[in-house]
Amino acid sequence: MRILFVSDNYPPEVNAPASRLAEHAQHWLGRDTELDVITSAPNFPEGVVYDGYKNAWWDRTDQDGVSVLRVKTYITANEGFIKRTLSYMSFMVSACVSGFFVRRPDVIVATSPQFFAAVGGFVLAKVRRVPFVFELRDLWPASIAALGAVKYPILLSWMEKLELFLYRHSDAIVSVTQAFKRDLIERGIDGDKIHVVRNGVELSHYQPLGEKDAELAREHGLEGKFVAGYVGTHGMAHGLDKVVEAAELLRDDDNIRIILVGSGSEKAKLEAMIAERGLDNVVSLGRFPKSDMNRIWSLCDVALIHLRNLDVFTTVIPSKLFESMGVGQPVLMGLPRGEATDIVEETGCGIVCEPESPESIAASLKRLAGDSALYNTLREQALAAAPKHSRETQALSMLDVLSECVKKKARKR
């Protein structure tokens, strides 16, 4: 089976869509499966093309057995609705045009959260007469509407109509949460074609960590400290200003440190906030390549996962939850009650605090830092939960969905 996958993110980018696709690919290859990926030059989230790459009309490479075609797009930082929309639409057009010149696939998959990539995948699938599968990673545009990023109701209405059109006309939908599936069914989408394939952890990449990286710990004043680490995008959705406010409440506890690792639209604002308040218990670090992530993870005693207290985030499951399980790191999760918090409590891999509550975040960190028995129990339960969410299992489940779509198409001919 030959798969054509349309995604505007792919390694060396390290965000969730890029990691999911690349890790799925390694479990698909060698199973009578070939994979072509159409993507953009790596630039997320700063909007700066990574060293060694170029924003070209056609740049094809072999990347770990995957044929990767990078196409030219309008590149901008992950901030500002208009500029990002222009970037998404430019990728849609470039991917659609270039897709006519790659080898003929048996199935085309396109991924969200923004669905303009899916529009390109849908058009390609119709023209090339192959099944189209929509990988649903986020209820977009509902999520950006909840954040107040869409100022024009007419535009939002048009985007929602396009969203529903794609759902209705896809041959299958692969949702990353059960909550997304329920939402689509409530909006009239046929539940029989919606398949849930959650994110997971690549157990070969994420292993229990040993000692903290001595060099990094010394460089950032983390030796002998209890460290809570947020690793990921610093965006509007993440509410990290409340994490900084929690650090202010903890400034007299010399044992606890918070590190914020990554970049995004809110990074500069957060760093200004840390400087203005003179918080020497918060360390802000930039984006690291995936090859260095184990060094970063080793610094952290607890993985901090936080989103704003909005109803739309009751439906999401941050992928870093499963990565934390893999390295044996207890989780402190500040999300609205939903599928993600249920996983934390059912597996016992961490504790849940109130989202956007500095007081709850601070109290929870003090509890974890001060109770070694609780901490060790959570760590053991995190490690025990990881194999139940292996990336390999999830990848093969998705491959079954794609294979069945191809078989159904063949039976109709």
Image (cartoon, grey):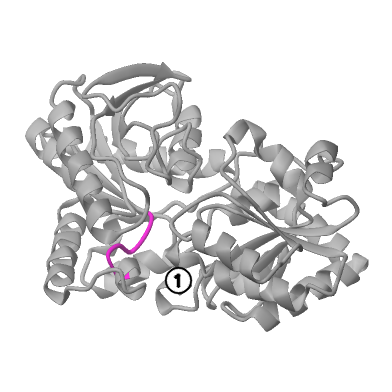
Q: Residues within 10 Å of mark 1 (few under 14, many from 20)?
A: many
Residue 140 lies in the magenta-colored region: yes
Residue in the picture at 32% in, 36% down: 403
Depth check, front residue: 366 or 200: 366
Q: What predominant SS class does the magenta segment belong to?
A: loop
Query: Mark 1 falls on what kind of element?
Result: helix
Amino acid type at image mark 1: Phe
Depth check, front residue: 5 or 81: 81
Q: Left or right of 211: which side holds 173?
A: left
Residue 352 visible from this viewpoint = no
Depth check, front residue: 180 or 155: 155
| Residue 109 placement (x, y as % from top left) | 28, 40
Height in image: 102 above or below 72? above
Q: Left or right of 151: which side holds 365?
A: right
| Magenta segment boundaries in residue numbering | 137-142
Height in image: 113 above or below 9? below
Image quadrant of residue 161?
bottom left
Depth check, front residue: 99 or 348: 99
Q: Quadrant of the C terminus?
A: top left
Residue 51 visible from this viewpoint = yes
To which residue does mark 1 refer?
313
Q: Left or right of 89: which side holds 327?
A: right
